[in-house]
Amino acid sequence: MKSLKAVFFSALFMVGNSAAQADEVVVYSARNEQLIKPLFDAYTKETGVQIKFVTDKEGPLMARLKAEGRNTPADVFMTVDAGNLWQAAREDLLKPVNSKVLAANIPEHLRDPGNEWFGLSVRARTVVYNRNKVKAGELGAYEDLANPKWKARLCLRTSKKVYNQSLVGMMMSEHGEDKTEQIVRGWVANLATDPFPDDTKAMEAVAAGLCDVTVVNTYYFGRLIEKKPDLPLAIFWPNQNLKNKAAGVHVNISGAGVTRHAKHEAAAIKLLEWLSSEKAQNLYADVNLEYPANPKVKADATVAAWGAFKPNLINVAQAGALQAKAVMLMDRAGYK
Amino acid sequence: MRAPGGFGPWTAAIGLALLSLIPVAVVASAMLHPDQTLWDHLWRHVLPELLVNTFWLALGVGLGVTLLGTGLAWLTAACEFPGRKFFSWALLLPLALPAYVTAFVWIGLLDFTGALPTWLRENWGIAQLPPIRSRGGVILVMVLALYPYVYLTARAAFQGQGRRLLEAAQSLGVSRRRAFFRIALPMARPGIVAGLSLALMETLADFGTVSVFNYNTFTTAIYQAWFSMFSLPAASQLATLLICFVLALVMLEQLSRNSRNYATSARGGGGARRIVLGGANALMATTAAGLVFLLAFVIPMAQLLSWTYAIVATDLDIRYLDFAWHSLLLAAFGATLVVALALTLAYAQRQRPTPAMQFTARLATIGYALPGAVLAVGFYIPVAGLDNLLINAWHDSTGQEIGQIFGGTLAVMLLAYCTRFLAVGFGPVETGLARITRSMDEAAQVLGTTGLKRLFRVHLPMLRAPLLAATALAFVDIMKELPITLMTRPFGWDTLATRVFEMTSEGEWERAALPAVAICLVGLLPIFFLVKHSDART
């Protein structure tokens, strides 16, 4: 075993991140270690390129990129929502990538119009209900949950979570601010209990009969059902029958972009291209029961069993552009 | 004039204060650029609620930790009852559990879908318990998580004052109860207040626990402005308000304390007798201590262990040795550095106890009241700025590209811990120093022991207990710390705390139990050490 002193002092005084090495990519990731490490290991095995990464929340990672400026060691910035990627692009922390591979693999509504970031997996936010108390036919759109017939039957996760912010942002781009605020006020009026800190708790409350219906990301549903298959819960795909472009299930993305001052730009682009490829997409999405962003790739069998749905095709960048406004709207409407 | 201490107390204190003030100043500099629309919104829709919420939370937690911490400290330090020896260290254990983990466990157990309400509903038809996700619930859980700060510092104070004064009072006909309230309690006030300040600053800076409860406070608004509305300036402005508020409170307390002298020469020594509780009193003491221990530690730990049992086979791997090793190393070196700096600052203050000096010391320790991620950014911005300066200068003179120099090194990480946790070291050390009488200094001087020699030969041996307490607190706090660790750790330097983060940030709380239990196991080391050595002398 190396002596304590040797380990410690080398790390203490040696330059932490020596100057750019060839054959490596440095990633700042808000996507968890257990979700990305298997991918990075597979990539290194296949290409020999080493990947160094560090995880944190998006906000601190962006503040860090900004502070480090052109001397940042990071080549790739990775998040679990579109809003933060949009913000990174706005702060000029990312650079446009012109890649035919990425353009072919990732549908237009799941990437930045300016090509500064790309969705790599899809996170669908849908309705989950109690099978014993609600018939699927009673459900329709997210907007319908504001109907008084759901009085004291609705459970929601807190408005602090980005997925609710992007859902409301998307509704704003479709209905405008006033109508959206009315809908959100309707939701709040229908709540059976204070908003929950996470999706799982909201679903458990539906299963226990405290309320009848909630709105969650599908992978939380997948995880919960895997652990407790007997819960009387089912997925409903909302907003399927509307005719306009905005119709469809609200989707967010987990995605990535190349940093403005990347030292290994070419290698970083190669990594993103590989992540969007058919062989990597399953590994990327399936580990967390998400949907692949590449339409040529089929979702995991568990996920596919929930049925097909029509996603909302408005560009996910809209969620970022409207996020701050969505938060203010929810504050005004009393959605905690 | 140079102070008799001989090592320029002003220089030391100002140097330290400046160091830990840098991140605070960076955060406060955002005040220069207010965002009008955002502030209008915050004033109208966010601030009213969060001010009320923060007020009640601080008041509730403050009262709760003072009562619980002081009461339990008196019982274990001055009384004798069945189980006293066990409880005297066991009551410190909740320190090793991150508060937000305890919060998650309690909500899981007591919310509508939890085990207890479900059982009551199905077997007894009791429809609803008082809701755990409420103001009362968050206060209760935070009191259970934070009372050990007061317990630890109050206990040291009671131990230090000895029982001779009390015995003298009783021989003069003062009742035991009156003696406690008129003598023991007032004399222990600096110790109690030191612990209370730490608990309150921790409460105000807390984000994890209140978000599990979805209870809106200053901190949640700070993070909402930053993470959701993408306005780090607005977040920093809110944080600056919070800091001003804390500073005002701290100065008020300081003013009310200044006129008094808490030094005592009547030390307990080995001969002091404990108050032996009998009959109903003994039973009540054991029950109270047992109940607190059960709620604050045993039940949360049992839940964590049962979650750990379910996932340990798949999640525990060889890397955990590294995680634990990293945590241990950072906490040990970090705590040592924190306490060394705290001692310097407290000693400088003792040498020159002017109001300006006291204000400087308070400022230097204010970082503890800032939400962790805000402090981390405030710290990282100047570090990265310095790096950029050096890298660019190097590039201009040699034409070579080099990587970061300070960013991503352990030295920077440890320094960041100091800016956050100086308060944790300073509180116990300051109160410890205040108990050493001036006459003792003078006696030492007459015998020719001055300056550093006096510090090492006279003061340090008498500061053993407070130094141990400060080290243990800082150690455990660094073990649990997240935002600074996440932002400043070198590549690959994951710790047990960052493992908890990886799991909880995607909502996998059950899987977070394994690293949380591991934190607890490693965190036990200094607690055992502390108790073994601080009790040896009483």
Image: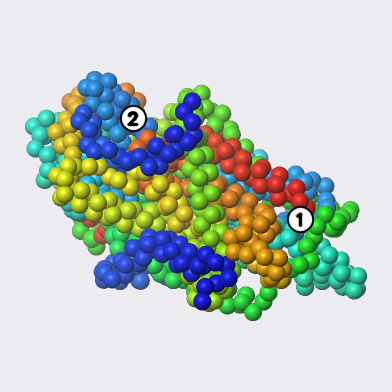
Residue pictured at 63% horizontal, 65% vertical: B450
* Tag 2 near tag 1, CB within 8 Å: no
**B307 sits to left or right of A153:** right
Spot occupied by residue A32 in the image (x, y as percentages of width and height): 36, 37
Hey, which quadrant is residue A270 in on the image?
top left
Mark 2 or 1, closer to the camera: 1
**In this rendering, does residue A20 appear at all?**
yes
Amino acid at circle 2: Lys
Chain name for mark 2:
A
Spot occupied by residue A43 in the image (x, y as percentages of width and height): 25, 25
Of residue A274 and residue B121, the one placed in the foreground of this image is A274
**In this rendering, does residue A182 appear at all?**
no
The residue identified by callout 1 is B77
**B522 sits to left or right of A333:** right
The residue identified by callout 2 is A37
Q: Calculate the distance from the C-alpha at mark 2 to the C-alpha at mark 1.
A: 50 Å
